[in-house]
Amino acid sequence: MAGADEAGRGCLAGPLVAAAVLFDYEALTTRELRLLSALNDSKQHTPEAREALYPLVMRAAARVVVVSRCVRGIDARGLHKTNLAALRDAARGVTDGVHGDVICLLDGFSVADFGRPQRAIVDGDATSAAIAAASIVAKVTRDRFMHHADAEHPGWEFAEHVGYSTPSHREAIQRQGVSPLHRMSFQSLAYQQLAL
């Protein structure tokens, strides 16, 4: 069973990150299954809980693939197309070369055929352990990038809001303008106030 999800789709700044996780449930120990029972949509966990779950997922997964799409690529191709392509690439990557029957569950969206059966599940990160694991991997990977970006681009407080449209982020945009990490294809009030 493979699951795929993304993080950062609704952000004003930073990359979109898709992850896919393949579990071989028959190979998991009872202890691993117990530890993974806490999996849920990454947004339902605190940052500390996500960081604690991340290594558990990485150890228990048979395979993990992470795909990142940069800001300029998102602006050039559009968010939805970029999201579907990243999810497809992650799902294809995690199942390539795997023998036997593998189904890939995707959170919310079907993607173009990649040679394996797939099923889009609305709110799948709350109902599928594989999708929830992918959600954790994508969110932790993206948040770590944004924390690093905070040092590279001071003043926007990326470590605080990790690129989402919070009041403090919008205030930073009003105060400083946009950084190289801001997506200019978004129709955001934060940008309209700057006449961008």
Image (cartoon, helix red, strand yellow):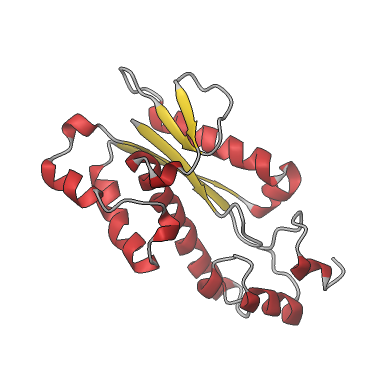
Q: Is residue 176 visible?
A: yes
Q: Give the answer, above or below, for where 125 lies relative to 101.
A: below
Which residue is rendered at x = 63% and y = 80% of the image? Answer: 155
Give x and y (percent) for residue 71.
66, 54
Instruction: Describe residue 110's horizontal placement relative to residue 31 as left or right.
Output: right
Residue at 60% x, 78% y is 154
- 47 versus 173 height, above or below: above
The residue lying at 44 percent from left, 20 percent from top is 116
Quarter assignment of residue 171: bottom right
Q: Residue at x 78, y 58 (%)?
A: 187
> In x, y percent, where is residue 173?
72, 75
Q: Position of residue 168 (x, y in %)?
A: 62, 78
92 left or right, relative to 149: left
Q: Quadrant of the N terminus?
A: top left
In the rendered image, which quarter contains the C terminus? bottom right
Please tell me whether residue 158 is drawn above or below residue 38 in the rendered image: below
Q: Is residue 54 above or below residue 97?
A: below
Q: Residue furthest left?
A: 30
